[in-house]
Every structure is written in structure tokens, then in C-alpha cells.
Image (tube, grey):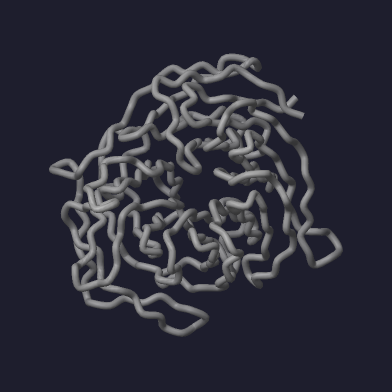
Amino acid sequence: MYKRAQSIPLRHSASALGNNLAVLRPPDPKPPCSLSVVHGRGVSLLGLASESEAGRNVHSQRLLHCKEGGATARRAEPLQGGRGHCKEGGATARRAEPLQGGRGHCKEGGATADSTLIIQARWCVLVSRVLLVVTSRRGIQMYEEDGSAMLYWQALELPEALDTKVEFARGIAAVAGLYICVGVSSGCVLVYNIPPRGTNITLCNELYQHAHAISSISSETFGDLERTVDMVSADDGGVICTWKSGEDFTLIQKLPPYGCACTSVVMWRGIVTAAYGTGQIRVYDGTTGMLHADIDAHARWINSLDVAPATGWVLSGSEDSFVRIWKIGEMDQVDGIEVAHLHSECVKDVLVCGAQFCDTRGDSFAVTGYDLCEILCYVKT
């Protein structure tokens, strides 16, 4: 169903991180214009040019280094007005005190850890602009689409009065074309309001429903944005929360833990697909929380999950060196969700850490592996 295409060389190998590949997908039929891969303290940004059916050539590649804020960045200010709130089934839930600006730090095993190590990089496509969001042990940084200018910097340091320790940020998603949501290790989801232009980015909400570190956040990217749910968050304890965005984010469902970490989640037309450390994939109705499928998808930890917004195909990548494609959709005459396996690809001797579709239909995809100095590309036959 797919064949190997020309690989994209990397100057720096990929770090062993989950979801360590991001693709900025333009509208079809154009090829992807940008890819990013995390390497230690930097993010490799690649711009692509279409060459032929045999593959694509890189016309630009540079390393974006993790920064610590400064004059070029707008540092986050504390939220005003004391406590905020988020809605949970119509009730008011407590929101903790705001994050404070300043330098973040973390300790590991009693010694100071390298706080500049990057955890994740992701493009967020909004209604009027595209931002590159980078998370690390130091904090959260937002850049222009090409990484040329840093627009915003949020340090990860909480007031000493709170019995909470924030060590890193992970999980990035653009929501409803207006917000960017970022998860942190304390279990909080930070919600940023993004203006159409400029640097007046504000931390407008903090969602507290998770007791473990956020592992992944995803949002509705295709079709009717007026659905009951349009965002999903997951944590290392296996808890999944579905949300309806707005001025006050509303909790729709809180799914109980499955017994292991939920490593990645994606959402498509209200359907939540979740990957786990056991190698299993579970498919839920995001509105009702009903479990529709439980799949023994991989033999080892699943590191990556992606969805093609035009078709609903799901791409999974695992430490078992396999990437697999699944067709997930609503059944025609029955109130249910059907799942079909479409393709398996063995990436021999590679610990897969990132896998992403390169177009909205799923006609091509790319794969990264730990310590691999190239991006492997596949196209539909």
C-alpha cells in the first residue's frame, strides 16, 4: 500500500522522545512545507521543496536553540484577579494560583538537571497565523512560524506556597483556531489566548483535572467545530479528559485510568483514539466516554500517534519498530465506531519515536527514530 521514498537527511539525530516529529501540513495538494525534529537542546527545522514522485529534497535546514527568554521575548505576567475557574458539567471548579514569570529550574536525583533540554516542538495552526511552540524543562516558548523570532516565553516556576512541582512542559495543541493549550508535569493544562497578530499572548486559563504529568493534547482539526467536544488531554497515569473550548473550558468526560500511561491521543470528529505503553490502542466516543474498540496494536510502547484530518486514518509508531495505519470512522446504520487495519510497515532496527502524515489524506507519511540521522519517507502506491 505504501513504498519507501527518498529519505530526508538530518544534520542532528533525533532524541529519544515521544512524538518527536512535527509536520506543518498545508492544504492539499501541496507538499508539506516544514518538518521539525528535536535534538537535545535544539530543534531541527526543515523546509521542503517538491522534486518528483521519488521523494522530496530539503532546500533549507537549521537548528533552533532553546532560549531562556530575554529582550526579544514577551515574558508571561501573572493572571490578574486571583482565582479563575473552569466548568465541569456546569459546575465551577477551582483553579490554582498563576504561574509566575522568571527563571525556571528543576532538580533530579538531588542534582541540578539540564533545564535547557527540549521536550517537544509543534506547529499550531490558528485562524489568522501559525506559531511554532517549543517546550522544555526551562519553560514554554512561542515563535513565528519559521522560528525567526520568539514572541512569548513562560517560565515553569510555581510559587513556593503551592505544594506542586513543575519540571517540564509536554503536550501542545491549537484549539478552535484561537487558543494554544500546553500541558505541564504537574498535570495542569495551560490555555493561551493568541491574538491575530503581535506579541500580546496571554495565559487565560488553567485546567486542573489531571493528577499526573500531561503526556499529550489533541484537538478537532476538521469539520464542524461546534461539536460537543473539541479537545482531549491525557496523562502518564492513563486518565483522559475531553473538553469543550470557549471562554471557560468545559469538562465533558473524564475517563478512568487504564492501568498504564496514555502516551498519545488524537481526536477526529468527536472520536478519541488513545495509545498506551502496553502497545494497545483504545477508541472512545469523546462525548459519551463509551469505549468502542480495544486493539492489541503493537508489541511494545507506542511513541507516536497521528490522524489524517481528511480521512480519519490513524498512524501509530512504536518501539517494536513497526508503524501501522488504521481506518477509524462512524458506522453508517449503527450508532457505533468501526476500526480497520490498513497497513503495517517494519522499520528494521529503528526505535520509532515519531510518525506523522505529510498530507491531510494520509497519502504519505514520515518516520523518525532514536539516533537516526534521517527522516524516513513513505508514499502511497
- Residue 128 pos. (x, y %): 41, 47
Q: Residue at x 26, y 48 (%)?
A: 138
For residue 337, above or below residue 41: below
Residue 336 appears left or right of 77: right
Q: Residue furthest left?
A: 71
**Residue 82's quadrant in the figure?**
bottom left
Closer-to-camera residue (327/138): 138
**Residue 262's quadrant in the figure?**
bottom right
For residue 370, above or below residue 374: below
Residue 380 appears left or right of 110: right
Residue 243 appears left or right of 108: right
For residue 141, above or below residue 201: above
- Residue 95 pos. (x, y %): 34, 75
Closer-to-camera residue (370/304): 370
Q: Residue furthest front?
A: 109
For residue 96, above or below residue 152: below
Q: Residue at x 25, y 68 (%)?
A: 98
- Residue 186 pos. (x, y %): 36, 63
The quadrant in which the C terminus is found is top right
Q: Residue at x 65, y 57 (%)?
A: 269
The quadrant in which the N terminus is found is top right
- Residue 91 pos. (x, y %): 46, 84
Q: Residue furthest bottom?
A: 91
Closer-to-camera residue (269/137): 137
Q: Residue at x 45, y 68 (%)?
A: 210
